[in-house]
């Protein structure tokens, strides 16, 4: 890849146009530049060496950012891989995200930016309440919710015998 080119990302397609060039002139100061990493763009394309520029919370340039560009923060990614966030499709994180770990720093530190909660058939029946609880704290990652299929009624979880007084007892006892 030529070191002098900058690709602008629009809807997942790299486009270099006159307007993008004009935009590049306006945005030669970025919030963050990640320099010299091995970039995996998430499309399955081969990794490339290059830089990533971020402005106002968005990736605005990928490629070779000119050395004259300024940034509030520059990260040297030499020897590191720069990738879109990873997706954890089996996250037991719902309670933490609705509580004191709403910022999701342990996930973000591993590069995980999207989680799917309620794995293994578990989780609350009231998904709207769970969603509200998570959103209220200003959660730090994207969250998807699985429907907790093993919780048809309260008190029934996989591998656990409900109490005879539980509404789940009759269902469980016919399956046991
Ligand atoms: Zn699990």
Image: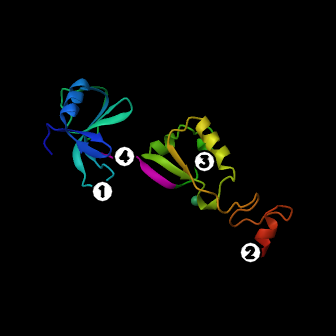
**Secondary element at tag 2:** helix
Q: How crowded is mark 1: few (under 14 residues within 10 Å), some or many (20 or more)?
A: few
Report helix, strand or loop for mark 3: helix
How many angstroms separate mark 3 from mark 4 (CA)? Answer: 22 Å
Residue 175, label in figure: 2
Dividing the image into 4 quarters, which one contains the C terminus?
Answer: bottom right
Q: Which of marks 3 and 1 is in front?
A: 1
The reply to whether residue 79 is visible in this rendering is no
Q: Residues within 10 Å of mark 4 (few under 14, many from 20)?
A: some
| Ligand 1 in which quarter | bottom right
Q: Name the residue: 15% across, 46% down.
A: 1
Q: Mark 3 points at which residue?
A: 94
Kindly identify which numbered label has been placed on residue 155: none
User: In percent of the image, x 56 and y 35: which residue is there?
Assistant: 138
Find out whether the residues at labels 1 and 2 contact each other: C-beta distance under 8 Å: no
Q: Mark 1 points at which residue?
A: 44
Which circle's residue, 1 or 4, is located before the other in the chain? Answer: 1
Mark 4 element type: loop
Q: Where is residue 174 in the image (x, y as percent from the top left)?
A: 78, 75
Going from N to C along the chain, the mark reached first, 3 or 2, is: 3
Q: Work out how far the residue at label 1 is from the one at label 2, CA to CA, in angstroms.
A: 44 Å
Q: How crowded is mark 2: few (under 14 residues within 10 Å), some or many (20 or more)?
A: few
Task: Give whichever of discs 2 and 4 has the lower sequence position.
Answer: 4
Give the residue number, with chain letter if any, for mark 4.
84
Q: In which quarter of the image is residue 52?
A: top left
């Amino acid at each position: 890849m030529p070191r002098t080119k900058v690709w602008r990302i629009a809807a997942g397609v790299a486009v270099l146009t006159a307007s993008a060039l004009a935009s590049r002139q306006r945005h030669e100061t970025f919030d963050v530049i990640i320099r010299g990493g091995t970039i995996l763009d998430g499309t399955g394309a081969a990794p490339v060496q290059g830089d990533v520029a971020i402005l106002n919370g968005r990736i605005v340039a990928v490629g070779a950012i000119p050395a004259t560009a300024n940034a509030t923060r520059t990260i040297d990614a030499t020897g590191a891989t720069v990738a879109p966030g990873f997706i954890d499709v089996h996250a037991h994180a719902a309670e933490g995200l609705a509580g004191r770990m709403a910022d999701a720093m342990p996930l973000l530190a591993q590069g995980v930016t999207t989680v799917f909660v309620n794995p293994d058939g578990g989780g609350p029946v009231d998904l709207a309440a769970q969603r509200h609880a998570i959103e209220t704290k200003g959660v730090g990652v994207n969250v998807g919710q699985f429907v907790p299929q093993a919780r048809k009624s309260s008190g029934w979880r996989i591998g656990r015998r409900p109490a005879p007084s539980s509404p789940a007892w009759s269902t469980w006892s016919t399956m046991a």
